[in-house]
Image (tube, rainbow, N blue to C red):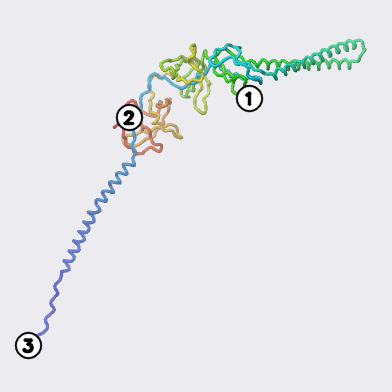
Amino acid sequence: MLDQSPSPETPTAGPDSRTLKRVGIGAGIVALLVVGAGMAPRISATNGLRDIAAQASVPTVATVLPQRGDKSGALVLPGNVQAYNSAAIYARTNGYVRQWLADIGDNVRAGQSLAILDAPEVDQQLAQAQADYQTALANQRLADTTARRWSVMLEKDAVSRQESDEKAGDLAAKSALSNAALANVKRLRALQGFTRLGAPFDGVVTSRSAQIGALVVAGNAASQPLFTVSDIHRMRVYVRVPQAYSAQLRVGMPATLSLPEYPDRRFRATLTSSSGAVDTQSGAVLVQLQADNPDRALKPGAFAQVSFDVGQGNGNGLTLPGSAILYGNDGPTVAIVGRDGRVAVRPVAIARDEGARVVISGGIAPDDRVIDTPPDSIQSGDKVNVQKSAAAGGKAHAG
């Protein structure tokens, strides 16, 4: 037999290690590509949302351009029309209304009777006072006679000086009592005269609360006046003028009045006096004007627009809508948008507040873009989007 030695082991068939590495690397790359392809849309969406949020955080505002001031120089302020003279007629004595002789709208003359009161208590008190006066007068006369007699007897040394002086003193006391009684009579006669209510001056009755049979109590603070008489041949007009214009108003300056019930009519008035003091609450000076009222078109208590020519006809003032002004602790300010879209908050000086519009005397230029209705929280440096651009005349339009 032939020796057969064992043959070496034959290697088992399988994948090579290099091949496995290549496969693993390829799978990783594929996995990375899959993950990257899935995250890219998310990142893009997140960035888009971030951009939208950033844009939404920037407020959109409307702007206006300041407008040149009116060259007329007219200062228009509200005024209160009052009668030249007005008197509230109260009762001076207690009583009942017996008769009223004048009604609302009646023309009355000075001293004319308006009403008559019945005051029986005053009549009785007057009768008693007259009796007391007669008694005091009789005692005075008797004391006078006695004092004269004792004075004659003193000259003859029939009585002592002490007794004569006592009689003279008694005469003085009785004279004083007589004078007091007479004063009481005059007082009650005056009260009795107050039962007739008269007009203090020529005018018209503008109110009446007297009713026949009504009890009238004098000195009652809660009572209404029985009559009000107003002299309306000439009227007084009271106007509060802002401090900035107070120096330009002078006595004798003409003014024009306009009333709602007479839209096509103007009334002439003249500034007659000024309080010369600035009210701490309103910051204005109270002035008084007077206007003739021959046809009684001006009525007491009426509201009027008073127009002064303050002489500012140069047109240098700039006007803005009242909604563009911010009022804070530092005074009035406006928010101006620069070319870079950044906000600059500037203080301004208000020359005249006309309600819907405000006249600015300093702090802005004609080409400044002023934010209309700015938010209270706006600050210098804030970024804004201008939705509307300023138009001449202070009106905004779509940009």
The residue identified by callout 3 is: 2
Q: Position of 142 compared to 30: left or right?
A: right
Quarter of the image with the C terminus is: top left
Q: Quadrant of residue 379?
A: top left
Q: Position of residue 118 (x, y in %)?
A: 66, 18
Check residue 220 in the rendering and tell me which mark sits there, or answer none: 1
Cα–Cα span, label 1 and label 2: 61 Å
Could you tell which of marks 1 and 3 lies nearer the N-terminus?
3
Q: Nearer the viewer, residue 121 or 148?
A: 121
Q: Amino acid at mark 1?
A: Asn
**Residue visible at 11% across and 81% down in the picture:** 7
Q: Amino acid at mark 2?
A: Ala
Residue under pointer 2: 396
- What is the three-letter code of the residue carrying label 3? Leu
Quarter of the image where one finds residue 318: top left
Q: Are marks 3 and 2 in contact (CB under 8 Å)?
A: no
